[in-house]
Image (tube, rainbow, N blue to C red):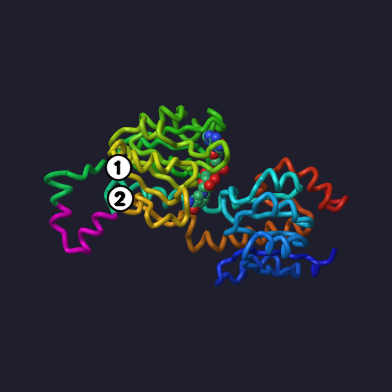
Amino acid sequence: MTARHWKVLAVNPHPEATFEHEHEALGPLGVELQRITPRDDAELIAAARDADVVVAMRYRLRPDVIARLDRCRLLPSGGIGVDHIDLPAAAAKGILVTNMADTFVEEVANHAWMLLLMAARHGVWLHEMVVTNRWREGQDQIYPILRKPMPRVTGQVLGLVPFGRIPRAMAKRGHGFGMTCIAYDPYVSAEVFAEHGVESASLDEVCRRADIVSCHLPHSPETHRMIGEAQFAAMKPSALFISTGRGKVVDEAALIRALREKRIAGAGLDVLEDEPPDPSNPLLSMPNVTLSPHMASASDVGAVERRRLMGRQIAAVLQGQVPIGVVNPAVLPSWQERWTPVGAR
Ligand SMILES: NC(=O)c1ccc[n+]([C@@H]2O[C@H](COP(=O)([O-])OP(=O)(O)OC[C@H]3O[C@@H](n4cnc5c(N)ncnc54)[C@H](O)[C@@H]3O)[C@@H](O)[C@H]2O)c1
């Protein structure tokens, strides 16, 4: 197959995306990303059934769409989460799925730490006191009366759920702030916990002991609403809940009840169950909640690295090579059988 036959389709790209960084690796192969903003799945299938690669960063790839991608070798996620791509359907079709691995771990940990400090030190409220000419009121509420409890953070317990790459970067920050770090992750070995100076604990223990619970769970059928009524009930009334993994791993109604009934003290959330949220979502008007619009991974450097890496992943598969960042390695034997030239296997 010659280069001019390769079709790489970007679904719903940002209108201003130019793909210049993806093209650093793709240009020499004579490949240009084509863009499509489909009205529905039928339109996507019509355009993508002969595509070699389908990049769907802002589009949910359902099983019936993936089942029709007859020439597709790769579905790059463009992020760390792959929950917008149906993995069983990709496996059934023998298509590799890649993610950005550790490209923006530091950004997400920094952002989670910002939410943590904003929640602990009432950042949004304090800013409002200044810009609405209530400087003294802000001071009075914090200093003499302490109507708004303000934890020191240093010396407290940071509870991490689970203990993947981003929570490990959180633990580094936690240690820097003089915190004790504990984490729940049944899939991580005792050696990894020890190497990072973090104590392994059950989910219940993390919720009970932590002053700040930071949730970084990927979304899957197994983790769906894993943090719910029982977990919020176990937390301290002074606890802060930070979430930058996926919104759907949290039972949001249970979180709202816990915040309303002051069974926990506050939250910092980059991810919500529905994104963007309905304007009537109570979390949007709670004074003890700090929000950001699912952008913890953003940074000037990371945005470029992410695009370069995706270009390299696509260029690799078009040449029959295994890309970095494969999240479904079980597909590899049949994939190589089909796409890797015999001499190069
Ligand atoms: N807000 C953002 O902008 C943003 C950016 C990047 C990543 N994320 C999210 O953060 C998640 C975590 O990223 P990461 O780099 O730390 O991922 P990772 O792949 O390094 O770690 C995931 C961890 O989840 C654990 N896990 C999986 N299923 C579990 C279960 N049922 N119970 C307990 N633990 C379980 C695994 O053992 C693993 O350690 C991503 O999957 C993504 O959804 C969000």
Magenta extent? 124-139
Closest to the observer, 131 or 229 = 229
Question: Where's residue 93, x and y in %?
Answer: 76, 48
- Tag 2's secondary structure? loop
Query: Which residue is pictured at 71% across the width and 64% down the height?
Result: 8
Q: Are marks 2 and 1 in contact (CB under 8 Å)?
A: yes
Marks 2 and 1 sit apart, C-alpha to C-alpha, by: 8 Å
The 10 Å Cα crowd at callout 1, few under 14, some 14 to 19, many 20 or more, is some
**Tag shown at residue 109:** none
Residue 209 lies, with reference to residue 168, above or below; the image says above
The 10 Å Cα crowd at callout 2, few under 14, some 14 to 19, many 20 or more, is some
- Dominant SS type (magenta): helix
Query: Which residue is pictured at 70% across the width and 51% down the height?
Result: 64
Query: Which image quarter: residue 252?
Result: top left
- Asked if residue 175 lies in the magenta stretch, the reply is no
Query: Which image quarter: residue 240?
Result: top left
Residue position for label 1: 260
- Tag 1's secondary structure? helix
Query: Which residue is pictured at 69% across the width and 61% down the height?
Result: 42
Query: Which residue is pictured at 56% across the width and 49% down the height?
Result: 81
Kindly identify the amino acid type of the residue bearing the numbered disc 1.
Arg
Question: Where's residue 251, x and y in %?
Answer: 44, 40
Closest to the observer, 126 or 104 = 126
Q: How many marks?
A: 2
Which quadrant does the N terminus fall into? Answer: bottom right
Residue position for label 2: 286
Question: Where's residue 67, x and y in %?
Answer: 74, 51
Kindly identify the amino acid type of the residue bearing the numbered disc 2.
Met
